[in-house]
Image (cartoon, rainbow, N blue to C red):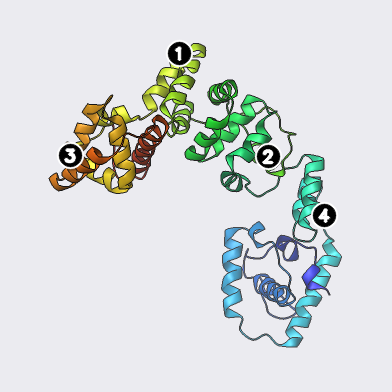
Amino acid sequence: MDLANMPVPAGEVFPDAGKGSTESEANGLTRSQKAAIILRMVQTDGGRLDLPALSERAQTRLARDYLTLGQVERPVLDRVLQDLESELARDGLTFPDSIADTLTALDAQLSPDLISRMRQRFGISSTENPWPVLDQTAPKDLLAALQQEHPKITAVVLSQLAPDRAAELLKDLPDEAGTQATFSISQIERAPADVIRQIGTALQAGHGNTKETALDVATPELIAAILNPTGARRRDEIIAALGAQDAELAAQVRSAIFTFGDIAERLSPADIPTITRAVPEDTLVAGLVAAQASMGDVVDFVLANMSQRMASQLRDEMAEREPPSEEDGEAAMSELTNTISKLRDLGEISYS
């Protein structure tokens, strides 16, 4: 018997494995022990069984028997195989009754490219989560793939990426497309996880074939998380456009966003040392210099709530620093506020 290629899920080798200690009249082994022996023989022959398909209780019993069986003589192995062949002859085999289940069962047997093409042909999403891979994809590549997509598809993509990655993508979207996608986040509702996965799989494969769908999200908070790392000018443009379509949503988003100007009003003075330690000194200096003219109260608040030595050192560096360009200053302030949001998410600081 070719165990390495045996097309039988673990649950069909011994369906009752793990349900008790019924003895086999042939050799005194329980069904779970025989299942452990079959598993070891399959592994030795280079094959595998779908053990996660079994209940946790059955898997635990199987692991216990696997540990305690020790040396099993050849005559016992022969009898176990005879029992298995008798089971298969009596009960037969059950094959998948859908294309999706068939491709899943054959995933490790056929070439990955063929499986991928067949899934695309039949509109079936992969069982793997594509979003961690897409989260590492260059924004320009995602941008190219989203050019012809409906704003709701772009909204799903933005909602599935990490906020800083979503902000990069949003920054490069055309103004109208970015505004519509951001607004669409507020309109999408609940969708099955496999539909969301299918959108990611189709995007990862580099073709459209996606359709309008929805996703369960806390929209104001999600939009705020995406807009937080975005530059102030672009962020204000999007919120203004949102306000023209839904004033209540725009107000909720604005309230959920933490900006550089909020530092003095919403942060505890005791948290300033934690924040300044987490930000590169060059970024901190650039952000403070950029904010001096328009947000002097924020700069004073930051400097007043750290050690005198550190504050004096920063003032000296700020005095020697040329004012950054508007773009560089905005980037430095955005990095600072993004760090504050991350520290809040980690529970290291809080703000009102």
Image side of residue 26 versus residue 191, left or right: right
Q: Of marks 1 and 2, which one's residue comes earlier in the chain?
A: 2
- Residue 203's tag is 2
The local crowd at label 4, few if under 14, some if 14 to 19, many if 20 or more residues have their Cα within 10 Å, is few
The answer for how far apart the CA atoms under marks 1 and 2 are is: 32 Å
Q: Of marks 1 and 3, which one's residue comes earlier in the chain?
A: 1
Q: Which residue is mark 3?
A: 305
- Residue 95's tag is 4
Secondary structure of the residue carrying tag 3 is loop
Q: Quadrant of the C terminus?
A: top left
> Marks 2 and 3: which is nearer the front?
3
Q: Of marks 4 and 1, which one's residue comes earlier in the chain?
A: 4
Q: Which residue is mark 1?
A: 247
- Residue type, label 3: Asn
Q: Of marks 4 and 3, which one's residue comes earlier in the chain?
A: 4
Q: Of marks 2 and 3, which one's residue comes earlier in the chain?
A: 2
The answer for how far apart the CA atoms under marks 4 and 1 are is: 55 Å
Secondary structure of the residue carrying tag 2 is helix
- Residue type, label 2: Leu
Q: Nearer the viewer, residue 103 or 309?
A: 309
Q: Is residue 347 visible?
A: no
The answer for how far apart the CA atoms under marks 1 and 3 are is: 36 Å
Is residue 101 depicted above or below 68 in this figure? Answer: above
The percent position of residue 228, horizontal first and vertical second, equals 42, 32
